[in-house]
Image: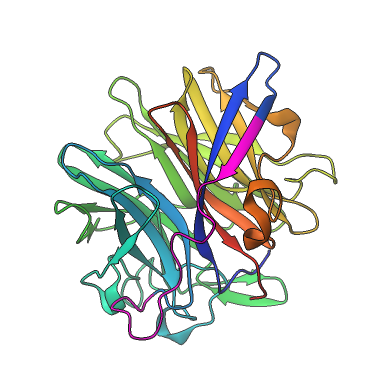
Amino acid sequence: MRVILHHLNLLVAVASVILDSRCSAFSVATRTTSNPILTASSPGDPTQFDSGCVANPVILAPSENNPKWQCYYYGNAGSWSGGRPCFLPTGSSGLAESSDGITWSKVSGSEEDGAILTPGQEGEWDAVQTGVADVVRVGQSLHMYYFGGSEEEISMGPGAIAGFRMRIGRAKSTDGGRTWVKDDSVLFDYDESEGLFASWPRVVTSTVEPWKMFYHAFNGKKWRVFGAESSDQGDSWKRTGLVIEGSDEEEGFDFQGIGTRAVVPWRDGLLMIYEGVAKSGTHSLGAAYCDGNNSWCKLNDGNPILEPGKGALGEWSSQVIGTPYVVVMDDGSLRVYHCGKNGPA
């Protein structure tokens, strides 16, 4: 497993994707910003929980109830709860707002060090680390789907690590995302047949069909994406099985598996922009499309659509590109938010 600790920042690009009947795609990406849109906090800033890194943007475009763009994200200050070593850029979650989706200002939350969501108490399922994974509008409220890691130690490589036994939870906000109340218990548990954890859920809501959740697991060798459905607006979920996995070819950019992903309604189906991991450990972004029959096909002939340090992304993201989030713009273009890294951990 690739260890990503510090110096992760957030960037935004715009990609236009053209789908044809052969399930291949041509993608053109132009960088919208030459610098990160959100970076780790500096000493003296009101927000300090994210002084080590920021990652995983979750973007809400303006609505009737809120004229501003919102970016939910997670980060840490160099360690997990209780001073434990951190092996992911997770920890607590924060909020930033914008008038255009490009220039952002952090909102200092009411939780510790300016966060809006933090790990639970000792002994709780999310006591070590947490991370926002998605936020959806439900009536006048916001529902956050997040994941958390417990104090249980599981074998990862040469030793045992706390915080990797991850499960999925939910929190709700009635004040525009400023404060959040967690559900009383885990919303969605991991399944040993899938892997060591269930994490990074993305949720697609609907008024006529069951809601869909896409999450990923790691079985000690590869990352794979699984699905679940809900017929009660997210109160309970039923597993639907494997959704998509990496290439069988060792040279494939996603040979080691598929992890974080964005899923949005698109052209009478669903579009997935996902983070693929190569045998070398390189993280790139790929795309897949589902036309409504629950069968996914990889776009661009199974090749990446965005690669670290190449094309529109330049040197800024030369080491890592990941945690994509997609907003479908009014003109049909796709605005892709993601994290990037260009230096050593």
Q: Which residues are magenta?
A: 27-49
The residue positioned 69% from the left and 61% from the top of the image is: 318
Q: Main secondary structure of the magenta part?
A: loop
For the image, the number of numbered tags is 0
Q: Position of residue 88 (x, y in %)?
A: 55, 68
Q: Position of residue 128 (x, y in %)?
A: 43, 74
Residue pushed farthest top?
A: 21
From this viewpoint, is residue 339 visible? Answer: yes
Q: Is residue 132 left or right of residue 226?
A: left
Q: Nearer the viewer, residue 56 or 30?
A: 30
| Quadrant for the N terminus in the image | bottom right
The residue positioned 24% from the left and 73% from the top of the image is: 111
The image quadrant that residue 81 belongs to is bottom left
Q: Nearer the viewer, residue 300 or 87?
A: 300
Whether residue 26 appears in magenta in the rendering, the answer is no
Q: Position of residue 283 (x, y in %)?
A: 68, 54
| Quadrant for the C terminus in the image | bottom right
